Image (tube, helix red, strand yellow):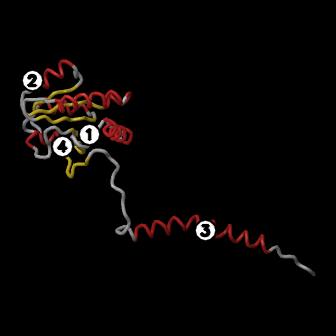
Amino acid sequence: MNINIDYSAKIKSRIYFILIILSFIGPLIFATLMYIYRDSLPIAPPSTNGELLESMINIHKNSTSEKTLKTFSNKKWSLIFVVRGNKCDKTCSEILHLIRQTRISLNQDSSRVMNIVITDQKNDDIEDLIKADYKNINKLIDPKLLDNELLNNGTLYISDPLGNIFMFYNKENLNFKGLRKDLKKVLKISQIG
């Protein structure tokens, strides 16, 4: 009796069997190794154009102004521009223009975002600019809120619909594309606002 054994088929079936086992065990081994060596693996920083605040500022806890609290009860994302003093120079007017254009460029999501200027005193320059060109920008006078040392003059901030300021842009890192990209990202991820 002569039995022919097909060794190539036997080897192929063993290889398939090993691959099937590895497809289940492989991810488990990989995850275990990642967990064990997590401290020595480099982690990429968040890819944002703005800078994240070390600790969020909650507007509802830091403000006593009824107008401010009412504005932030709208449950919208906010671009907040801080102006101290009673002047609005060229940079100030450029930032007002930038936040208006950024909000408009969001198309259907523009209704989820509001633009706000917060000052510590009456500012005729900003009043005139808003009346002339920026009617959709809310102006708030809130010296109590601006007592917070993390809110700097000439800086743009983003707050979530719950009134938590979490990101800021200095004059150096503020540009239309970066701001729009960050806003689109949070609006896409978030289901609120």
Q: Nearer the viewer's eye, disc 1 or disc 2?
A: 1
Residue on which the image places disc 1: 174
Question: In whole angstroms, how far apart are the C-alphas of marks 1 and 4?
Answer: 23 Å
Q: Amino acid at mark 3?
A: Ile
* Front residue of this view, candidates 143 and 170: 170
Residue 71 location, quadrant: top left
- The disc, 4 or 3, on the residue closer to the chain's N-terminal end is 3
Circle 3 is placed at which residue position? 21
Q: Position of residue 157 (x, y in %)?
A: 22, 40
Q: Residues within 10 Å of mark 4 (few under 14, many from 20)?
A: some
Disc with the residue nearer the chain's start (1 vs 2): 2
Locate residue 109: give its quadrant.
top left
- Structural crowding at the residue carrying mark 3, measured as other residues with C-alpha within 10 Å and reported as few (<14), some (14–19) or many (≥20): few
Residue situated in front as seen by the camera: 139 or 58: 139
Residue type at mark 4 is Asn
The disc, 3 or 2, on the residue closer to the chain's N-terminal end is 3
Residue 136 position in % (x across, y down): 24, 23
User: Which of these two is toward me, 76 or 127?
Assistant: 127
Which residue is label 2 attached to? 124
Query: Which of pointers 3 and 2 indicates the residue nearer the eye?
Result: 2
Closer to viewer: mark 1 or mark 4: 1
Mark 4, residue position: 58
- Residue extending farthest to the right is 1
The amino acid type found where label 1 is placed reads: Leu
Q: Is residue 31 above or below residue 169?
A: below
Left or right of residue 123: residue 40: right
Q: CA distance from mark 3 to mark 2?
A: 73 Å
* Discs 4/2, front: 2
* Relative image position of residue 125 (x, y in whole percent): 11, 24
At which x and y percent is residue 134?
A: 22, 22
Which structural element holds mark 3?
A: helix
